[in-house]
């Protein structure tokens, strides 16, 4: 059974978070579950304390190791595309700060999150523990998925891929959804939603332009590409 994040904070920060939710609504985010999760997860805790004032701006922010915490709109947009329900099993490729996973967990998902950079997993786990958010993190090549935990109701990729990894599609349940940004490493990616309609068939939907850090790994970009 999922739980709301457990924390106390300055009411001013709660007000800023509610203001952010209104901005996301104005930009087209309509899922009540997504907006409710954004309203409850304290994004500032995923920031260095010196930069808390930036936490509720609708912008990405560097978190070290060449990575970023995604723009709140992007987090909300991907979460909405996943169309998850409480109790569904979700794989996140790219733990990063842990914020996206916290939003999905607060929506009621059973979240498994894999990250290539160990230091980011350690940092994310510290915040997730403070918030008492129940989820599992792993260090490894996310482009290979997480075969030990398959199949998944949904898979979300939080870095830009050169193409859609077939490995991830095969780890989806029938009617499972893969949400992944695909495109040139240095430029703009399109957001894809791939639905596995049968053992051999998929349905592909393509949405707007986004910019992500590159997805590194065997089925992604290489370190030298």
Image (cartoon, rainbow, N blue to C red):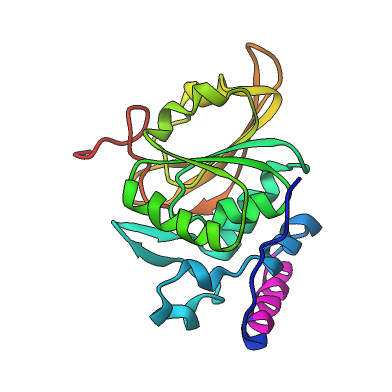
Which percent across, then down, holds residue 46? Answer: 48, 66
In the rendered structure, does residue 208 fall within the stretch colored magenta?
A: no
- Please tell me which residue is depicted at 78% across the width and 42% down the height of the picture: 85
As drawn, 176 above or below 63: above
Q: Left or right: 92 with respect to 116?
A: right
| Front one among 123 and 96 | 123
Q: Left or right: 178 with respect to 24?
A: left
State the quadrant of the C terminus: top left
Which percent across, then down, holds residue 90? Answer: 63, 37
- Write the start and end of the magenta stretch as one range: 14-27
Whether residue 62 is visible = yes
Whether residue 97 is visible = no
In the rendered structure, does residue 24 fall within the stretch colored magenta?
A: yes
Magenta span: chief secondary structure:
helix
Give the residue at the far right of this rendering: 32
Which percent across, then down, holds residue 122? Answer: 39, 52
- Please tell me which residue is depicted at 65% across the width and 12% down the height of the picture: 199
Q: Left or right: 168 with respect to 73?
A: left
As drawn, 109 above or below 219: below
Give the residue at the far left of this rendering: 224
- Please tell me which residue is depicted at 69% across the width and 43% down the height of the picture: 109
| Front one among 146 and 71 | 146
């Amino acid at each position: 059974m999922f739980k709301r994040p457990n924390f106390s904070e300055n009411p001013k920060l709660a007000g800023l978070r509610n203001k952010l939710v209104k901005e996301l609504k104005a930009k087209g985010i309509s899922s009540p579950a997504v907006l409710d999760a954004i309203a409850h997860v304290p994004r500032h805790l995923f920031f260095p304390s010196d930069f808390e004032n930036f936490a509720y701006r609708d912008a990405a922010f560097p978190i070290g190791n060449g990575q970023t915490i995604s723009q709140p709109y992007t987090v909300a947009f991907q979460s909405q595309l996943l169309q998850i329900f409480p109790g569904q099993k979700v794989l996140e490729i790219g733990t990063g700060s842990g914020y996206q996973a916290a939003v999905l967990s607060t929506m009621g998902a059973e979240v498994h999150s894999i990250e290539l950079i160990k230091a980011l997993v350690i940092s994310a786990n510290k915040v997730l523990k403070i918030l008492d958010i129940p989820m599992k993190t792993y260090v490894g090549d996310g482009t290979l998925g997480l075969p030990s935990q398959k199949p998944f109701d949904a898979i979300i990729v939080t870095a830009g891929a050169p193409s859609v990894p077939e490995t991830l599609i095969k780890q989806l349940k029938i009617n499972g959804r893969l949400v992944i940004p695909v495109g040139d490493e240095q430029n703009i990616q399109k957001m894809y939603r791939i639905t596995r309609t049968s053992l051999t068939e998929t349905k592909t939907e393509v949405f707007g332009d986004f910019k992500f850090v590159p997805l590194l790994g065997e089925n992604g970009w290489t370190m030298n590409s």
